[in-house]
Image: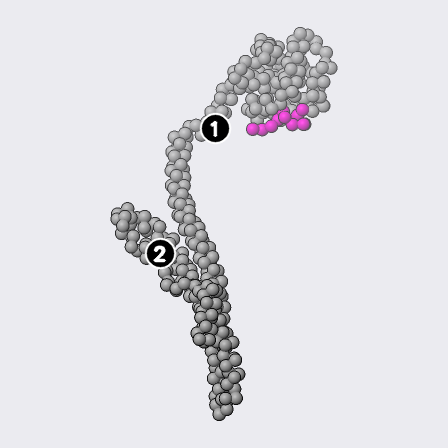
Amino acid sequence: MKILFDTNQSKTVLAKFKHKIDGLVPADDFEKQRNSLIRLVTSAMTNRPAEWDKLCEINIAWIGDQFISRLSDEEKALDKEGLDDICSMCFRFLFELYLSMKNNLAMEFEAARRFVFNNVDSFEHSAKEQIEYAIREMPIAIFKSIANSDSIESIKDFNAVSAKAEKLREDWDTELSAKEGRVNKLKESLEKYENGFNFVGLYQGFDDLATAKSTERDNILFWLKILSVLIVLPVLAELVIIVYHIDNISAIKDGLIVSIFPTISLAAIAIYYFRVLLFNYKSVKSQLLQIDLRKTLCRFIQHYSDYSSEIKKQDAGSLEKFENVIFSGIVTDDGNLPSSYDGVEQISKLIKSIKS
């Protein structure tokens, strides 16, 4: 749609020309009503330019620029012939407005239209031809222009457009179905990755715990070796002393008798703590076995739930023994942990037996 009246230039031209019309003195009643029509139309174009641009598209395309140029021409005199020509142009715009709008014209516009209809012969020859064309032929020309417009052609080709739209819809549906399938596959993959990452995190937790327990096991093993040396060392020391003084054993007899009690006590205490550490060592090894089992289960359990649910639908007890083996803990018989009182009691019994 071409914009003619809703521009600053056109508004300025229309306003100036309206002032010119206001300054004219009509010679008779015809000129008075003619000038009133021109003033009415130009004022309406100034006040509601968007409406005139929308409803007068045909005449804007045909005589729009000529109309604005004629109004802005300062050199051309505003005599009867010139004003009649301008009035005929205004009438063409007014008549197209009348044909294009759904409602009837306002009272003053209807009166202006009837004035032209009733006074066609009073206009100059050129203006009269324009008015007769507007009344008789312009409606047909407007209809022909509209009938051959792109909008009407689109309506004529409705079946083709409808078939094309239907095919386009089918193509969209096919494409959407394909994309939906890909999205579902991605969703399944993401769910698998999510489960995998969950079990990876659980596995990592067990692995960290296994590392800590391995360190604890190594420390216990280190102290077991130390205690083993402490248990054997006093006895070896006594034997070495005896071997070196075998020829003069009576000289060191008293010293050996005095040192035997501390030696035996030290050995007994070392043996007791050796037992304690040995029990802890076995316990840590058992815990490591349990942790390794759970680390293995983390690799296995991800698909086991789906598999077991399918199998149990057919036979509820088919996996019972398997689950008992897999999910049961590892049982180790390490004996009871000796208490501190047990160690003291053993030492006291040893001393009593020596005294007796």
Quadrant in which residue 179 is drawn: top left
Q: Position of residue 162 (x, y in %)?
A: 40, 32
Residue at mark 1 to residue at mark 2: CA–CA distance: 80 Å
What residue is drawn where x is 48% and y is 76%? 264
Q: Is residue 3 above or below residue 350?
A: above
Mark closer to the chain start, 1 or 2: 1
Q: Is residue 324 above or below residue 211?
A: above
Give the residue number, with chain letter if any, for mark 2: 328
What residue is drawn where x is 29% and y is 55%? 321
Side of 237 where 85 appears, left or right: right
Q: Position of residue 30 (x, y in %)?
A: 65, 9
Side of 326 where 146 appears, left or right: right
Q: Is residue 8 magenta?
A: yes
Which element carries disc 2, helix, strand or loop? loop
Side of 258 where 67 appears, left or right: right
Name the amino acid, label 2.
Answer: Ser
Please identify the quadrant where the C terminus is shown.
bottom left
Please identify the quadrant where the N terminus is shown.
top right
Quadrant in which residue 282 is drawn: bottom left
Disc number placed over residue 151 in the picture, else none: 1
- Which residues are drawn in magenta? 1-11
Mark 2, residues whose alpha carbon is within 10 Å: few (<14), some, or many (≥20)? few
Q: Nearer the viewer, residue 171 or 104?
A: 171
Side of 259 where 72 appears, left or right: right
